[in-house]
Image (spheres, rainbow, N blue to C red):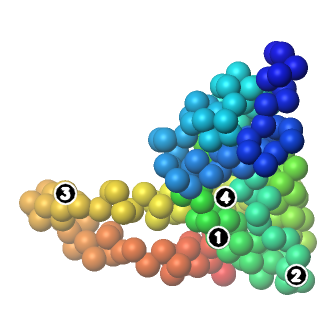
Amino acid sequence: MTKKQVEESAPGQTRLGPGAVVRAGLELLDEKGADGLSIRGIADRLGVRMNTVLWHAKTKARLLELMADAILAEVPVEGLPEPWEPRVRELFHRYRRALLAHRDGARIVAGTYAAEPATLRFAELLVEALLAGGLREREAVWTCWTLVYFTLGLAQEEQALPDARGPALARRLGAGEYPSLSRAAQHVEDTSFDERFDYGISRILGA
């Protein structure tokens, strides 16, 4: 990489760094969604060459890891309740809000395994709370995974809903081939995501 490429910067910036690349990636994500996210798009947004972006992000997979960690960095960790169960619940309410704050945010986080500071900070706080609640080490970690996967899955469904809704489900259930689903159809299509989230957290925690 040439000195000129290293020193390329977006308007108003004196020097490009990984943080600027990640911020541009999140801006592009919010504008175009995960399917519209590309190295070329980030380079165009920053006014630099593609290999300049790759100099800082290395690969698109690595860029997604950094973006996922940046989303987790938006989870505030101050002012958490002291008792372990309210603490876990509050952590996941904040986690969900951070995911939903970015278009396809849950999809980006779900598709990565980012062993990065903000991600590890969140996991540390969660496992610490679960251990304080009397869970053994394996139970604490597995409960952590279960809560994370549930939250990511529900958030992805919520974020995909505007594009996914249509008459196909109702038409297929109306054909009579799935009697149990037809019987519960109003609940199958329930979009009360806040209530579903609280219900799921309670079921996982056994509360």
Residue 100 appears left or right of 51: left
Q: Which badge, 1 or 2, is on the more N-terminal residue? A: 2
Classify mark 2: helix, strand or loop. Answer: loop
Q: Is residue 43 visible?
A: yes
Can you name the residue that lies furthest to the left here? 175
Q: Tell me the residue at 58%/30% (across/down).
A: 40
Q: Which badge, 3 or 1, is on the more N-terminal residue? A: 1
The span from disc 4 to disc 3 (Cα, nearest Å) is: 30 Å
Can you name the residue that lies furthest to the top here? 1
Indicate the amino acid at tag 2.
Gly
Which residue does the numbered mark 3 point to in the structure image? 168
Which residue does the numbered mark 1 point to in the structure image? 97
Which residue does the numbered mark 4 point to in the structure image? 148
Q: Is residue 195 above or below residue 92?
A: below
Q: Which badge, 4 or 2, is on the more N-terminal residue? A: 2
Residue 60: quadrant of the picture: top right
Which residue does the numbered mark 2 point to in the structure image? 79
Image spot of residue 169 (x, y percent):
22, 60
Report the front residue among 17 and 60: 17
Classify mark 3: helix, strand or loop. Answer: helix
Quadrant holding the C terminus: bottom right
Q: Is residue 31 above or below residue 46?
A: below
Classify mark 1: helix, strand or loop. Answer: helix
The span from disc 4 to disc 1 (Cα, nearest Å) is: 13 Å
Q: Which badge, 4 or 1, is on the more N-terminal residue? A: 1
The span from disc 4 to disc 2 (Cα, nearest Å) is: 21 Å
Q: Tell me the residue at 72%/76% (across/down).
A: 89
Q: Is label 4 or label 3 in front?
A: 3
Indicate the amino acid at tag 3.
Ala
Query: Are circles 4 and 2 on residues that touch, CB within 8 Å?
Result: no
Query: Are circles 1 and 2 on residues that touch, CB within 8 Å?
Result: no
